[in-house]
Amino acid sequence: MTVKVVVVDDHGAIRAGLRLILENAEGIEVVGEAGDGITAIRQVRALRPHVALMDVRMPGMDGITATRELVAEGQCDVLVLTTFDLDEYVYGALRAGAAGFLLKSVEAPRLIEAVKLVAAGEGVLAPQVTRKLITAFAQTRGESALSPTALHELTDRERDVLACLGTGLSNAQIATRLHIGETTVKTHVSRVLRKLNLRSRVQAAILAQENGLAHDERRGVGNRGAGPPDQQ
């Protein structure tokens, strides 16, 4: 599959640089560009890309607002790419439903990999951002935990998948860990997001961390054994 991307940044030189990097990568096609959030939404609606590579600070509508609208409409996945790792940007982007958050200092190979991962339904976070989130978990543990009722909405297998998301595993790694098919993993992830009213697997990972499920998964509590994929 060729991953179609819309590049969103208010600086033309940066858009040109990102286009050059992405179009030189196998399996990626830049189908459009935008210099602000409103134009980005218009471009995405018209061009139907798999991924919007989204800046945060732009004139008019900012990237976080645009991300929230695109995700709410189910238009595409959003990978936020910004110069700043400020808490308000990190948390704002993830609350808006961004599938990933990278800094513009990222190396070209990592950026290419991240675009492909997001298009495949994975989540991507810059190491600097991951450390911020871990610190935030330690400071706010229990303050925003899911209610028991919400967790009870999940089946045992969906809890297993949520726990794996909390440790940062990809779909392929979850499939291996739980001895189920990768397609089945994608189905479970979709159900977890729907039942918990979440917009992205990154949000699911945060909730898994906040509720201690990731810790349980590391100890092996999440792995309930295996059966054929069609029985999971």
Image (spheres, rainbow, N blue to C red):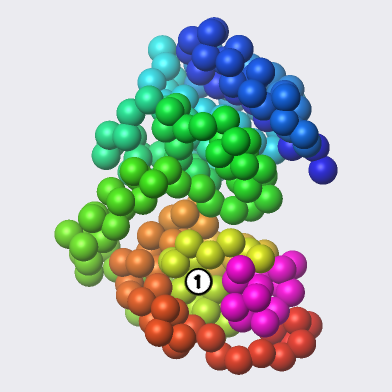
Residue at position x 44%, y 87% in the image = 221
Q: Is residue 16 visible?
A: yes
Image quadrant containing the C terminus: bottom right
Residue at position x 23%, y 55% in the image = 135
Q: Judging from the image, what secondary structure is the residue with disc 1 in?
A: helix
Q: Is residue 50 left or right of residue 215?
A: right
Is 36 rendered above or below residue 122? above
Q: Residues within 10 Å of mark 1 (few under 14, many from 20)?
A: many
Q: Residue furthest left?
A: 139
Q: Position of residue 219 (x, y in %)?
A: 40, 84
Is 88 included in the stretch rendered in magenta? no
Q: Is residue 160 left or right of residue 87?
A: right
Q: Is residue 77 left or right of residue 213?
A: right
Magenta stretch, main secondary structure, is: helix
Residue at position x 55%, y 21% in the image = 8
The amino acid at mark 1 is: Cys
Is 184 included in the stretch rendered in magenta? yes
Q: Name the quadrant containing residue 225.
A: bottom right
Specify the segment rendered in magenta. Answer: 173-185
Is 230 rendered above or below residue 198? below
Q: Nearer the viewer, residue 183 or 144?
A: 183
The residue wearing badge 1 is 164
Is 38 rendered above or below residue 218? above
Image quadrant containing the N terminus: top right
Q: Is residue 38 left or right of residue 87?
A: right
